[in-house]
Every structure is written in C-alpha cells, then in structure tokens.
Image: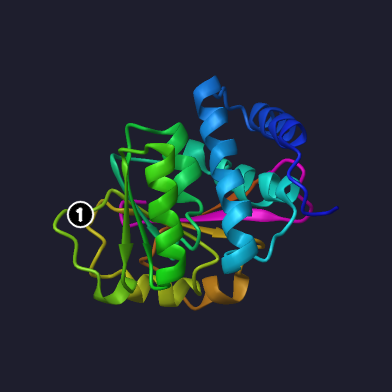
Amino acid sequence: MANHFDESACRGRLQQGSEMLGLALADEQVEKLLQFLTLLAKWNRAYNLTAVRDPLEMVSRHLLDSLAVEPHLEGRRCLDMGTGPGLPGIPLAVIRPEIEFVLLDSNIKKIRFVRQAILELGLNNVEAVHTRVEVYQPENGFDMLISRAFTSLPNMLDLTAGLRRSDTVLLAMKATVPQDELQTLEAENNCRIIPLQVPYTEGQRCLIRFSQAG
C-alpha cells in the first residue's frame, strides 16, 4: 500500500538523508520531525494539504528538501511566506530552535494544520499567521524571508518590499534556476544562485539568495 506509514523506513531515510546533508540531528529532533510527518500524512488524507501521498516520499520531498537550506539561514527572525502545511518553516524550526519563525499563508485550512502541528510538537519558536503577504504588517522586522514554490521572483520582490529592511536576506527555494525570471530583475538586486543537493530526490534544486548588502 503506497500510503502506508512505515515509521522504520521513514526514520532510516530521515537519519541517512540528514547525514548526507551534513546535519547531526539530536534524537529529540528526529522524533519531532517524524511526529510532524505522521501528522501531515494523517491530515493529508482528509484535507489534501500536499499532492505527495507516500510518507517515505514526504521524507525526501518535504523534510529533507526543507532541511537542505539550513546552512544558509541567517539572523534571529525568519518569515516563511506561503508556508502551506508548514514547509520549510516547521522542519527548520525543529532543528534551529534559536531562530523565531513566523509561518504565513492565506489558506486557512493549511494554517489550521500548522497551528495544530506547532501545538503537538511543542514548538515555542513558531507562530502561524493567516493572511496574505502583501497586507501583512508585523510589529517586528525580519532578518530573513524564505519561500518554497511561492511565486515568481519579480513578484516576490514586489510583494515583500514593505517587509524587507536594508539588511534583510530573501531566500527563494526553486526546482530549477529560473533564468527568465532572473533576467527581468533590476541590477541592484544582488542575487546569488546556490545549488542544493537533496538526498533521495531526482532533479535539480536551488536556492536564490537576494540581499541589498550583496
């Protein structure tokens, strides 16, 4: 059965994959990530939170894909825009408890799941917000904005103009390098393309990093 949750297989893939990424996860972090995966698989049957149905595939395409950006996190406050079912925010919050994460999405069904996951995992460094990026007005600024398959790069820069300080870093997770989008950007947008290798995942992945400071 494709959707059967084989915890042993998922644990093995998560542990081996995280080692391949150069991450040394504590036992408690592994347990929380597996707890999140269990919850996602359970809710997904009723609420269609993700097109990925196989829990083992979720380890690769959701957990490891999210964890692959960990070396590129900066600062103390991070906004995950269009987080969906909490990706990449929740996996990153589990392994980086010193960073305060705000997970934002306009889909109330997905935000309800994120709030339940925060509660069940006991994450004290995560807040879920139900709104659209362009109308969000936080009390405190962010060191970092991150997104995963959120929108085009030009649109993302436009939508986040009011959220970015001069020292705010923007990270966009993409499948392939969006050359057409990059060509339309203004020269003052300091941009760096960072290739990502996600264990057990075929195809390209990359991170586009924007920073006014270069």
Whether residue 154 sits left or right of residue 212 in the image: it is right
Q: Which residue is mark 1?
A: 141
On screen, 120 above or below 40? above
Residue 177, visible in the rendered structure: no
Residue at the outermost left position:
139
Whether residue 124 sits left or right of residue 15 in the image: it is left
Q: Which residues are magenta?
A: 197-214
- Tell me residue 107's x, y (percent): 43, 72
- Category of crowding for the residue at label 1, using alpha-carbon neighbours closer than 10 angstroms: few (below 14), some (14–19), many (at least 20): some
Whether residue 89 sits left or right of residue 40 in the image: it is left
Which quadrant holds residue 17?
A: top right
In the image, residue 201 lies in the stretch drawn in magenta: yes
On screen, 16 above or below 212? above
- Tell me residue 177's x, y (percent): 63, 63
Q: Main secondary structure of the magenta part?
A: loop
Front-most of residues 208 and 51? 51
Instruction: Report the residue at 36% width, 38% height from top.
Output: 123
Instruction: Report the residue at 63% width, 42% height from top.
Output: 64
- Tell me residue 130's x, y (percent): 32, 67
Which quadrant holds residue 51?
A: bottom right
Residue at the outermost right position:
1
Front-most of residues 97 and 209? 97
